[in-house]
Structure formats: structure tokens, C-alpha cells
Amino acid sequence: MDRFKSTKVASVFGIIGNLFLLIIKGIVAILSGSQAMIADAFNSFGDIFSSLMTYVGNKISSKKADADHNLGHGKAEYIYSMLISISMILMAILVLKNSIVSLFYGSEYSFSIWLIVVCITTIIVKLSLYLYTNKLYKKHNNLLILAASKDHLNDTIITSLNLISCILLSYNIFFFDGIVGSIISIWIMYTAIKLFIESYNVLMDKSISIVTKNKVLNIIKKEKQVKKVIHFNSTPVGYKYQISFTIYVDGNMSTFDSHEIANNLEEKIINEIEEIYLVVIHVNPM
């Protein structure tokens, strides 16, 4: 299964799984009045939106280059990742506000065994989705899948906290409910801000990492005919990068031979470094 098909399947699984969790969490949250469960239900609603954005963003970014978009539509992946992060931040602020009110003014609610059942069900579903999407991310290096994977892991952790809150409730300990709701919202906000920064960096044409740049320079250094390298630039193209640089060769070398060196370097860099989409080399005589 290729990169875009895998992302499509992951987003569909995310929509189905989160819709199921939203329904059962919403019912139990309304019946019990638990702020932690209400926060968890809001989180599932946000996850459905995120999965929809993943689906749409993936569909657009999978389009081939055309006359209006010479480098393809890859940045759609990051635009939609940014939309996901903004929606998560807004949701986290709302939930945090309600949790703080509950913490300071008190909120007694009814214990139900269904609170624990829903928590355990959520942990199983979310842990399964995390393992699946994390495997896909390692295979395809897709920021949309990474966002989904992080979200599933976060949900597993915060629902585990919710489970602790439900257990404490059975012993008539109510204050922890507001604390868990606050922790959940802060965790969501932290994750969303990190995702926003990652997306922002790509959209603002952040250069390749120093590790990847050194890989490229090491390949160039192996070419003995290259005397010097200057003007190294890079720009993101979807999940990969376009790089350009100038090499200096012996001025007595024929134009054909000097451009053969450039062609060989382009081929080696693209074949050996997964992150590189396109290489443009300018040749100057020394």
C-alpha cells in the first residue's frame, strides 16, 4: 500500500473509531456529569474533525504536479495539520475552563460502572489505533499520520487518567475529576502547539536538518572532481525537499564532462537520501 492510500485508510479508521467513542463517552458523560468524561468526549469530537482533515489533506496532497502547481500539492498536508492543531487548541481552552470551574466550585457526580467500561474500551481502541498509525508513520514519514499517531497515544494516556478518576469516584473522592479534566486539556494544548510549530516550519520553508545536509555534503565530497561547494539552499516540497547548490570544477574540463559530474551527483543524492525530492546543481569553472 502506497503512502497516500495508507493515510486514507488510517483516516477512515480514525473517523470510525472516534465516532464510536464519542457516542459512548457522550452518553455516559451526560448520565454521570463527570467533567473528566465530558473532556474526554470533547476530545473524541476533536479527533473526528482531525481525522476528516487528515482525509481531505491527504487527498489534496496526493495530486500530481500541474501547470499551476509545478512542485505538486504536498504542502496541503501541512496546511491541514495546522488546521487540526488550531481546532485542538480551541477545544482545549474550552475544556480547561470548565474543568477549572469544577475544581474550584465543586462538582459531585454519580458513579457508574459504565464510566470504567468506557475508559477501558477507549484505551483498547486508541492503543490499537496508535500502534497501527505509528507503524505507518515509520514507513511513510507523513506528518498527517504522525499527528494522528500522537493524538491516539495522547488519548490512551489521558483516558488512563480518567480511569483513575473514575476509580477514585467509587471511594467518594470527587476533586480529582476536575484535576484530570485540566490535565487532559493542557496535554491536548501542548500537543496541538507542537503540531502547529511543525506545520508552520514547513509552510515557512524551513531548511533541511543539519543531519540531512551533511549526508548530501558527504556524497559531494566523494566526487574528487568537485573543488568547492557554495550557495546550498533547500525548500520543503510536501514531505520532501528540493535542494540546490553550486559546484566548482576544473576550468579546463569540457562542458559535457562537468555536467556529467552534476548529473551523477543528482542521481546519487536522490537515490541515497529519502528526504530529497529534487536536486538542482549549477556548475562553475574554478
Image: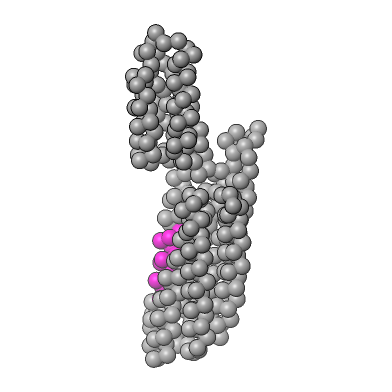
Q: Which of 210 and 57 is in front in this view?
A: 210
Residue 30 located within the stretch drawn in magenta? no
Which residue is depicted at the point 47% across and 59% down? 134
Q: Is residue 47 above or below residue 112?
A: above
Which residues make up the magenta segment? 180-192
Q: Is residue 226 above or below residue 233?
A: above
How many numbered marks, from 0 up?
0
Corner quadrant of residue 192: bottom left
Which residue is depicted at the point 48% across and 49% down? 141
Q: Nearer the viewer, residue 211 or 223?
A: 223
Which residue is depicted at the point 48% across and 34% down? 270
Q: Tell which residue pokes out farthest to the top in this image.
A: 252
Left-right relation of 251 to 256: left
Dominant secondary structure of the magenta stretch? Answer: helix
Across and down, in percent, residue 98 comes to 46, 74
Across and down, in percent, residue 40 comes to 50, 73
Q: Nearer the viewer, residue 237 or 43?
A: 237
Image quarter hosting the C terminus: top left
Which residue is depicted at the point 56% across and 43% down? 74
Q: In this view, does 231 lie above or below 160?
A: above
Q: In this view, does 107 lie above or below 181?
A: below
